[in-house]
């Protein structure tokens, strides 16, 4: 076994037998059981109040008139291999009425993706979860359209009649929609493809490759095109008409922007953002680290097909579809916009200001300003430096309100043409608030239930228990943890104890990484989806059922190291310090530690395996790029890889790649590595090929696993069969390499025969090295 002598391996096998005997006394839960659960949909409302726009995505959606609510449930159907979307609603007149929830519509999707790696089942992925109210009883969302194209379109459900209606009929996938006060909308969709010769015609006559992106060529786009991010178009969908919006001569990015679209009160104007491919040089004065990096990258010679993250706000006339630049400044991350009640002014913030304003906050992207829509003149509000804006809104035509990160409120009033801060820091509560409130009750160890609360009496009613069967499943206890690495960086996460945990025992540990902290119940630990078909290979409770502790590591905000060689080093320290912390705590066996990486964190894991002196025993990485030489060549030498490896891979710069790129250092890996491919079809295998090929050449234990039906995979898989396959393969891998344990499922015998051969060869290799 990896990282041990033959004697240690024998002792481990004995310990594993004792562990297996203990675990077999309980009815252990398998991956499919956890995947086959249900969750509430969390989504952004496209026409919600601006003051609340900075808050988390909602799970309960209240109608504009406040008379009813809707909750949408994703129920995973493992047997049918798909997901149900269940639309539920009830009134808000009383507690008893709120508790009489009923299902008015059900829709089914296979949740399979497309060959480009995009998920086709819109609502099952958080990035696509958008809800809008077309009127007081009709809710709209993105869903697969009618056959034969099955493009994602806007679909509505009447909460009274249950009528399901497809609202848009575009020839491409809709990626976003924003609803105006009168029920019209701006729809963002994938741009129509230009006419191209058929594949067979090009092969017969010969062709000239026009892009260095080999992934496009391998997927059949022989002339080359944007591979990872499709160009977008926007249309205004009114009553009986559709108008294509013009960017005013500005090139359109392949990505949607940061700015939520905001409609004027009369629905005649809107604020949208368009991408900027050639930003003016004076924008380099802006100091926000993300925008600074992108602006500096754009000053170099790069193809307009590259990933762009610089946008500029525009004012769009929805009668003509024409737009004009709002002002000479880019959109800042987290920027919000709010129209005044009379439609003559805009409140914006946190925002960049034109560089001519000479404002420190305006250069940092943290300013707040009021803009006159007709003249484009603006006034910056005197917001205290320590006030972090998370929400904005108008209280009246002459008064605005800002909401801070901790819920604190700040109001300004317009006195004789100048905006001045009020003495009162906390605004009075609304004159009338709904008596009935819907809440989702959960914590790290308690599954979510929907509860109705009478805010006057305090009486509560359980409205919906999503997963009553979870009470009968063996689950490891979860707790929050914190520690520091040797450089003083503070890290946090959640720790899943093994099922049947015994305080005096030492257990294997698997460390997972997530971009968002876990604040509620999750069976998996990673990503945003705690229940149901969960994207990635995170499988915390399934691993806990195999006697393995799992640490869900939270990423830290470190903008100064992102896109630099220091980025993977930061997470190497996190993995090492976490292991040391829990070994010292007495929980973990230091010879049985594994790592999991998905997407970008897969690069962190591969870097750690090749640059750390710690003998990690096993790892799984999924659907990631390793920032290596081969994948860079296939992707057309993206400049991002130059930045994270420290130089371009030519001449002397190649030395930096030889030292930093994980695949160039495969010989340093001590444990067993499984690489999984979830998206981009068969060509997606090439992203893992350099690392896999080098490890196989070195006779080190490595497996390249491709999920079922990968031609319909996606970077965030949601199809139940794909999720079960990916997570089961990862769980079996860790159980084998960390516990020395094999599943007795007869269908897995070939899998274990191959792994046993790897283990035997690895042991011989270790003995030869020693």
Image (cartoon, rainbow, N blue to C red):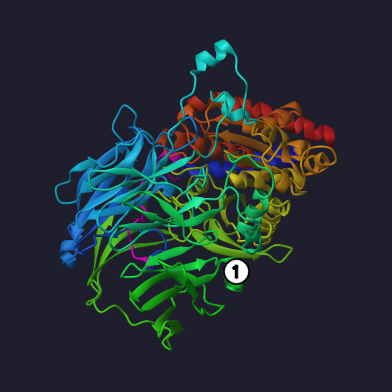
The residue lying at 27 percent from left, 48 percent from top is 238
- Residue 306 is situated, as x and y percent measured from the top left of the image, at 60, 41
Q: Nearer the viewer, residue 156 or 472?
A: 156
Q: Quadrant of the C terminus?
A: top right
- Residue 550 is situated, as x and y percent measured from the top left of the image, at 56, 51
Q: Is residue 600 above or below residue 312?
A: above
Q: Nearer the viewer, residue 97 or 152?
A: 152
- Residue 157 is situated, as x and y percent measured from the top left of the image, at 22, 47
- Give the number of callouts: 1
Q: Is residue 33 magenta?
A: yes
Q: Which residue is mark 1?
A: 356
Q: Is residue 499 visible?
A: no
Highlighted range, magenta: 26-50
Q: Quadrant of the N terminus?
A: top right
Q: Secondary structure at mark 1?
A: helix
Left or right side of 323 for 293: right
Q: Is residue 23 magenta?
A: no
Q: Is residue 621 above or below residue 95?
A: above
Residue that protrudes farthest toward the top in the picture:
204
- Residue 291 is situated, as x and y percent measured from the top left of the image, at 60, 57
The residue lying at 50 percent from left, 62 percent from top is 327
């Amino acid at each position: 076994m990896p990282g041990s002598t033959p004697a240690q391996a024998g002792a481990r096998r004995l310990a594993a037998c004792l562990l297996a005997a203990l675990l077999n006394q309980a009815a252990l839960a398998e991956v499919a059981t956890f995947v086959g659960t249900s969750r509430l949909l969390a989504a952004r409302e496209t026409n919600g109040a601006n003051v609340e726009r900075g808050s988390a995505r909602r799970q309960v959606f209240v109608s504009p008139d406040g008379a009813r609510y809707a909750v949408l449930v994703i129920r995973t159907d493992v047997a049918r291999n798909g997901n149900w979307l269940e639309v539920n609603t009830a009134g808000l007149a009383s507690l008893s009425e709120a508790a009489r929830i009923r299902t008015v519509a059900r829709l089914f999707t296979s949740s399979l993706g497309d060959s480009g790696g995009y998920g086709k089942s819109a609502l099952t992925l958080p990035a696509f979860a958008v809800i809008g109210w077309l009127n007081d009883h009709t809710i709209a969302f993105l869903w697969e359209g009618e056959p034969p194209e099955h493009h994602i379109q806007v679909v509505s459900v009447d909460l009274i009649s249950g009528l399901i209606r497809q609202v848009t009929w575009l020839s491409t996938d809709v990626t976003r929609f924003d609803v105006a006060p009168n029920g019209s909308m701006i729809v963002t969709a994938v741009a129509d493809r230009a006419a191209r010769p058929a594949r067979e015609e090009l092969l017969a006559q010969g062709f000239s490759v026009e892009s260095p992106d080999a992934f496009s060529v391998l997927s059949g786009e022989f002339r080359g095109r944007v591979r990872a991010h499709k160009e977008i178009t926007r249309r205004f969908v009114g009553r009986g008409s559709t108008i294509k919006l013009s960017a005013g001569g500005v090139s359109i990015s392949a990505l949607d922007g940061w700015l939520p679209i905001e409609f004027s009160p009369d629905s005649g104007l809107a604020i949208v953002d368009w991408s900027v491919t050639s930003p003016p040089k004076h924008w380099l004065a802006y100091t926000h680290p993300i925008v600074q990096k992108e602006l500096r990258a754009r000053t170099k010679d790069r193809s307009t097909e590259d990933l762009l993250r610089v946008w500029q706000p525009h004012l769009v006339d929805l009668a003509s579809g024409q737009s004009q630049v709002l002002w000479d400044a880019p959109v800042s991350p987290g920027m919000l916009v709010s129209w005044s009640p009379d439609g003559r002014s805009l409140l914006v913030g946190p925002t960049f200001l034109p560089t001519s304003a000479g404002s420190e906050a305006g250069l940092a992207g943290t300013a707040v300003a009021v803009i006159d829509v007709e003249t484009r003149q603006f006034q910056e509000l005197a917001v205290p430096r320590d006030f972090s804006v998370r929400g904005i809104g108008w209280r009246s035509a002459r008064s605005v309100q800002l909401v801070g990160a901790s819920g604190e409120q700040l109001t300004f009033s317009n006195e004789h043409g100048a905006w001045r801060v009020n003495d009162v820091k906390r605004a009075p509560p609304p004159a009338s608030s709904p008596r009935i409130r819907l809440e989702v009750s959960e914590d790290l160890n308690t599954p979510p239930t929907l509860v109705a609360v009478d805010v006057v009496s305090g009486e509560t009613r359980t409205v919906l228990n999503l997963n009553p069967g979870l009470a009968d499943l063996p689950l490891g206890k979860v707790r929050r943890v914190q520690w520091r690495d040797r450089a003083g960086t503070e890290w946090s996460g959640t720790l899943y104890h093994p099922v049947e945990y015994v305080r005096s025992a030492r257990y294997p540990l698997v460390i997972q990484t997530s971009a968002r902290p876990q604040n509620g119940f999750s069976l998996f630990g990673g990503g945003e989806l705690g229940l149901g078909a969960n994207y990635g290979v995170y499988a915390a409770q399934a691993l806990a059922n195999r006697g393995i502790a799992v640490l869900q590591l939270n990423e830290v905000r470190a903008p100064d190291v992102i896109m630099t060689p220091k980025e993977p080093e930061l997470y190497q320290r996190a993995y090492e310090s976490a292991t040391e912390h829990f070994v010292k705590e007495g929980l973990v066996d230091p010879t049985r530690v594994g790592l999991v990486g998905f997407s970008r964190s897969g690069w962190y894991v591969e870097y750690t395996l090749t640059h750390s002196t710690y003998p990690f025993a096993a790892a799984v990485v999924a659907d990631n790029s390793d920032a290596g030489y081969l994948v860079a060549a296939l992707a057309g030498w993206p400049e991002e890889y130059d930045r994270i490896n420290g130089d371009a891979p030519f001449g002397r710069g190649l030395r930096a790649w030889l030292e930093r790129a994980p695949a160039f250092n495969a010989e340093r890996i001590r444990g067993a590595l499984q690489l999984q491919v979830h998206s981009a079809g068969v060509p997606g295998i090439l992203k893992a090929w350099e690392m896999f090929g080098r490890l196989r050449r070195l006779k080190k234990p490595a497996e390249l696993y491709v999920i079922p039906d990968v031609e319909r995979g996606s970077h965030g898989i949601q199809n139940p069969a794909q999720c079960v396959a990916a997570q089961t393969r990862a769980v079996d891998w860790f159980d084998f390499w960390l516990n020395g344990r094999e599943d007795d499922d007869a269908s897995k015998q070939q899998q274990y025969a191959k792994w046993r051969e790897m283990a035997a060869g690895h042991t011989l290799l270790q003995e030869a090295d020693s």
